[in-house]
């Protein structure tokens, strides 16, 4: 087996900030294109390598090749069993694992689709998975998927949904020396802010994983001048909701929470800025159950939103499982440990070789 940590360092040394992935995808294509057991196709800067052995099940192993901009950590640095550098954690270590599995397992017990995709670190509309699902959904057809995002070598199952709601409260301008002649829109925020601050989200348990809903005010704007009663106050709310709710259910719930703190008949406006539904864990799927049995720790819920939702929306159960401490992602001190790479490689390799 190739030294996984050295392979990670090799990938780190190929710059691939979002929208500049051509060089690393060229490299990966060169590594996989000559393997007889893989059919390799490229769509833009997305590379898909597939076996076609007629197996009962097909598993996707996917990882994004782009990184955030560098922060003095452009080059890999090896220190014993640790690789430091941009993308080492998020997620070139995961990509290194996928690459080495594709090269090493010529006769998997399940058909495998290895996916290396672009532009995960920027807007969802640029995400390589979105492009593949739009242009070549046949390449991503599968029974289950594993995204090798950094999880500390622990399965993070499903993911929560996320939405942003913009609320504009109306008031009436007046001179601040005569405030009784107006209506202060900023003061009207108080009941809404109190409801958000005291919000206690549900904690549903799905497939043994506890999700945790949350509601946060993430932006407040208002004010005209130092001597004017403001006639407008804008607040943006971010609601993280468990995947047993639909996006519509989550919006309905949030409107119930706000209640009479918002008076649309009196001129207040509410706008849904975005809404990305979550993904159920689906750990009962045979492939994901078999992977869970091989993982060193029990699965936990993914509280953030991740690309597993792209697969779940199309009926493909998916989990995150990869090396690297996710709290180090995007940090100047980004790094990954050899042991976590080897743990993930062993678990996925065993699954590919046995299928159960």
Image (cartoon, helix red, strand yellow):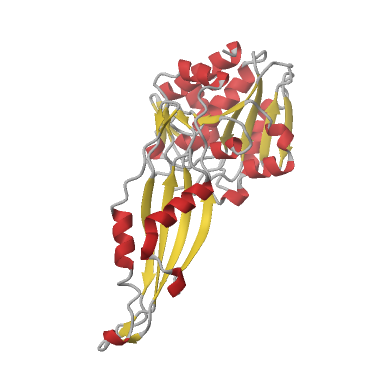
Residue under the image location 44 percent in, 44 percent down: 241
Give 339 or 312, whichever is nearer the viewer: 312
Measuring from the top left, give residue 277's x and y in whole percent: 53, 44
Residue closest to the eye, 303 or 147: 303
Residue sitting at x 70%, y 25%:
50
**Residue 120, above or below 298:** below
354 in relation to 328, above or below: above
Question: Compared to 9, does 106 lie above or below?
Answer: above
Q: Please state the horizontal and vertical placement of residue 272, each as a whole percent of the image.
A: 51, 59
Image-based side of 282 in relation to 188, left or right? right
Q: Nearer the viewer, residue 67 or 239?
A: 239
Screen quadrant of the C terminus: top right
Q: Quadrant of residue 327?
A: top left
Kindly tell me whether residue 1 is visible in this rendering: no
Furthest residue in direction top, as rendered: 354
Which quadrant: the N terminus? top right
């Amino acid at each position: 087996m190739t030294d996984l940590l050295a392979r990670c360092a090799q990938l780190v040394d190929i710059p691939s900030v979002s929208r500049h992935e051509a060089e690393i995808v060229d490299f990966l294509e060169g590594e996989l294109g000559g393997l007889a057991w893989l059919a390799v196709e490229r769509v833009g800067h997305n590379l898909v390598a597939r076996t076609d052995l007629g197996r009962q099940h097909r598993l996707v192993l996917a990882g994004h090749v782009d990184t955030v901009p560098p922060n003095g950590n452009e080059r890999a640095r090896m220190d014993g069993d640790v690789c430091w550098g941009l993308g080492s954690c998020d997620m070139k270590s995961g990509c290194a694992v996928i690459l080495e599995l594709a090269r090493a397992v010529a006769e998997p017990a399940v058909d495998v689709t290895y996916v290396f995709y672009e532009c995960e670190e920027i807007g969802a509309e640029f995400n390589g998975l979105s492009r593949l699902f739009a242009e070549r959904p046949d390449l991503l057809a599968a029974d289950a998927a594993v995204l090798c995002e950094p999880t500390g070598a622990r399965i993070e199952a499903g993911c929560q949904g996320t939405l942003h709601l913009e609320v504009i409260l109306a008031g009436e301008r007046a001179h601040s020396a005569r405030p009784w002649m107006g209506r202060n829109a900023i003061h009207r925020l108080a009941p809404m802010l109190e409801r958000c601050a005291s919000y206690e989200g549900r904690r549903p348990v799905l497939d043994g994983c506890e999700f945790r809903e949350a509601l946060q005010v993430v932006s407040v704007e208002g004010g005209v001048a130092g001597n004017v009663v403001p006639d407008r106050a804008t607040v943006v709310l971010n609601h993280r909701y468990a995947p047993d709710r639909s996006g519509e259910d989550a919006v309905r719930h949030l409107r119930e929470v706000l209640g009479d703190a918002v008076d649309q008949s009196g001129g207040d406006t509410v706008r849904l800025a975005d809404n990305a539904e979550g993904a159920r864990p689906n750990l009962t799927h045979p492939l994901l159950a078999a992977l869970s049995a091989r993982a060193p720790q029990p699965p936990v819920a993914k509280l953030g939103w991740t690309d597993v939702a792209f697969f779940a929306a199309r009926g493909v159960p998916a989990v995150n499982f990869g090396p690297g401490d996710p709290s180090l992602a995007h940090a100047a001190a980004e790094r990954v440990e050899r042991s976590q790479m080897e743990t993930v490689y062993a678990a996925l390799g065993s699954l590919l070789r046995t299928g159960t």
